[in-house]
Every structure is written in structure tokens, then in C-alpha cells.
Image: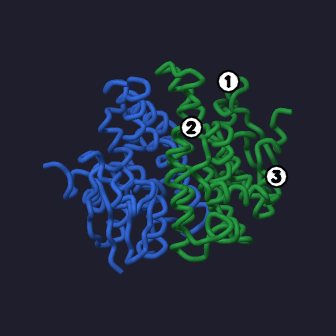
Chain colours: A green, B blue
Amino acid sequence: MSLVLYTYWRSSAVYRVRIALNLKGLEYEVRPVHLVNDGGEHLKPAYRALSPQAQLPTLLDGDRVIRQSMAIMEYLDETRPTPPLMPAYAAGRARVRELMQAVAADIHPLGNLRVLKTIESEFGADAAAKEAWSRRWIARGFDGLEVLLAQGPAGRYSHGDTPTLADACLVPQFYNAVRWGVDLTPYPTIRRVAEACQALEAFQRAAPEAQPDAPR
Amino acid sequence: MSLVLYTYWRSSAVYRVRIALNLKGLEYEVRPVHLVNDGGEHLKPAYRALSPQAQLPTLLDGDRVIRQSMAIMEYLDETRPTPPLMPAYAAGRARVRELMQAVAADIHPLGNLRVLKTIESEFGADAAAKEAWSRRWIARGFDGLEVLLAQGPAGRYSHGDTPTLADACLVPQFYNAVRWGVDLTPYPTIRRVAEACQALEAFQRAAPEAQPDAPR
């Protein structure tokens, strides 16, 4: 069954799914949706017909439409089980999902473009205030995530010695942390894991700058 | 194995887990953690030793510590499979997870207490501005969620005729929408589903006002 991914090069949520697809060795067709040009292509009726939330990513698996990065990644792991990106036991899956949510629910939503636009329009936040806002929530989130990662089963990646969906969430957030200039000194475990991931081709090919719709 | 839930009566994330526990018919011990009194009991070392993110809920299952509401609910469904709270097929699970994330990642994080405190401290938002902020993100999120629910398989609840984890996420967010005075006229499907859920004893017993730590 053919896979199609609606994508934007710098979207953190799409970046996660690209990592999962690459780790699985799956080919997919790329359909770029520009989040800024033309008032935001994701807001147009053509894309909203696929995504009522007007959000990326959307995955087509044949005629199935799957949205929300967390749902897409679990779906891929259930329908293409090799290599597995989730542990084989319930407590391990709970830990991986905890690490995923610590990024996807506790950090990423607060730095979203729509939130930055709103603190500008409602509170007059300028560029510096928006950057400080982004840094604040990443640092606050990394404070907890660093401890969670350091406490967990020792291993090269977030959960053991093979990559999991936790790594697919961590690396895009780490990329954003670097982009916004977050001081990463207090997060040695996050740095170690992110760097181990970024040495893998699956992560490199998923990076924003490697995408066909990235600016040259 | 005995279950212990660290809880606060009005926390939306804990409310979700209470619903899931009740739908499963599971008994659990309640350990209240007050989010406001004494500067926030969740921020004290005793609770942080359990939850490095200093967030609710935390579930103890014997000596296992499970955090993050989404991870806890999936863990309960995997370890106590009857009655199931997730569909038996991958595409159905993807849809339920999409509905869960549409609340847990796209609405709830923006109305969190720590975010409201920050728009006050950083931008001088007063009580009215904080309420408008909360209403804005709930309405923005419900705009998409209404379409997702209306498009889905017809049924009494979010996904079919038995409650799922999607309902456990929807109802606490609906409760917050009512609390903040969001105009619910544009969301007939959300209202219909939330009201069907609230007619069930499992949801009623999970409601904030029914908790032992709720103010009298």
C-alpha cells in the first residue's frame, strides 16, 4: 500500500513521523504544505478537507487518512512491525509513551507558530519576547525530561539500545532547542541521546534541512 | 496488584485517568496532591521523587510508577484488557489516538495553570485576559474536533457505541469549556457525545466535584 506524507520541512510534528518512516525503511511520497506562504496553505479548503484541524502531518496509507503525529507513529508501528519502535512489554511501552508525551504535550504545543502569533497579537510580544517564551518552555520541559531519561534503563537511546518512538519525539525538540539558543549545559543525557540518534542515517534524512521543500 | 492514583480534584489530566479506571471497574487508592496550597505540593521534593516533571497524575501499580495520562490510560488498557477502551483494529486505534491528542496536545497544554501564570507574569494578563486566553484555545481546538467527531463512525460515543479513551479525554475538556464559559453552540456533536458520557456512572464518579479532595 502506498504511503503519502503531507509535510513542511521545519514542522516538528512532521519531523517525528519522517524519523519513524525512515527507521522502518518505508518509502513515501512527499506532499509539501507551506505553513507561511500564501497565508498558510494548511488553512486552505483543499488541505482542511484532509485535516479538519488544519495541522500537519497527515499520512495517507492507501485510502486511509491518519492524522496526529503520535497516532501516525503508533499506527505505523502496529501495521509495519519490523523493526519495532516500541518495547515488547507494557511497562516499557508506558515509559516510551511518557517520554513521547513529555515532548508532544508538555513542550511542543507552547512553542507552536499559532501560539507565538497570539502572544504577539494579544500581548504585543516582540521577536525577543517570543524567543524567550520558546526558550522558557523548552528549558522547563527539558528539566523534567533530563531526569526521566537519566533514571531510565541505561542504553544508547531514550529507551535501551535501539531507537524507539521516544527518540523520534526527542530529536525534533532538540533541534528546536538548538534553533532557539536554549542553554543545553544542564541536559547531558538529552544531549548524549540526541547526538547518538543524529549519527543515524534515518535521523539525518529526516532533518528539516534535508527536505525537498527546505529553502536552498 | 494494588493501584494508587496521585490526584487533584480539578486536574483535567487526572480526571481522564479516573474515567478510565472507573470504566474498567478498577479500585484504586486516592492520594491527593494540592496544586495550589503551600506553593503547590506537586513542586515539593516528596512528589518530585515520583514525578520528575512535577505533574499529575502518577499511577502506582504495585512497585511500577507510571506517569503521563495518555501513557497511563494505554497501560491500563493493555494490562487490564476488559472492557477494552481501544478499538481492536489499527485504523480505529489511530482514530481514537487522534481524538485523544486533539485534546491532550492541542487544547489542554495551553490552558494549564503554569501557562496562565506565565502570561500574567510576563505580559501582565489580568483575570479577564486569562479567561479569554483559555476560551480561545478551547474554541480553536473544538472547531477541529467537532468536524473530526462528526465525520467519524456514527455512534453514541466518540468512536462507536461503547466508550473509549477518546471519551476519557473529551469529557474533562468539555468540563473546562463549561467552566470557562465557552460558547458551545457551534459544537453539537461534542455536546451530544459529552452528555452521553456524563450519563454514565463511571464518568459521574470521576467528576471533579465527586472527589474526596474537592472543596465542600
Position above or below: B209 against A118? below
Looking at the image, do the residues carrying marks 1 and 3 touch, with CB atoms under 8 Å apart? no
Using the image, tell me which numbered label, if any, was put on residue B171. none
The percent coordinates of residue A53 (x first, y second) are: 57, 39
Residue type at mark 1?
Gly
Local crowd at mark 3 within 10 Å, few (<14), some, or many (≥20)? some
Q: Residue at x 67, y 67 (%)?
A: A85
- Whole-angstrom CA distance, mark 1 to mark 3, is 28 Å
Mark 3 vs mark 2: give the one in front.
Answer: 2
Whichever of callouts 3 and 2 sits on the residue coming sooner in the sequence is 2
Residue farthest along the front direction in this orientation: A185
Disc 2 element = helix
Residue type at mark 2?
Arg
Mark 1 vs mark 3: give the one in front.
Answer: 3
Residue farthest along the bottom direction in this orientation: B1
Which chain letter goes with mark 2? A
> Residue A190 appears in which quarter of the rendering?
bottom right
Residue type at mark 3?
Arg
Q: Which residue is labeled 3 in the image? A: A205
Q: Which residue is labeled 1 in the image? A: A39
Which chain letter goes with mark 3? A
Instruction: Check chain identity for marks 3 and 2: say if they share one.
Output: yes
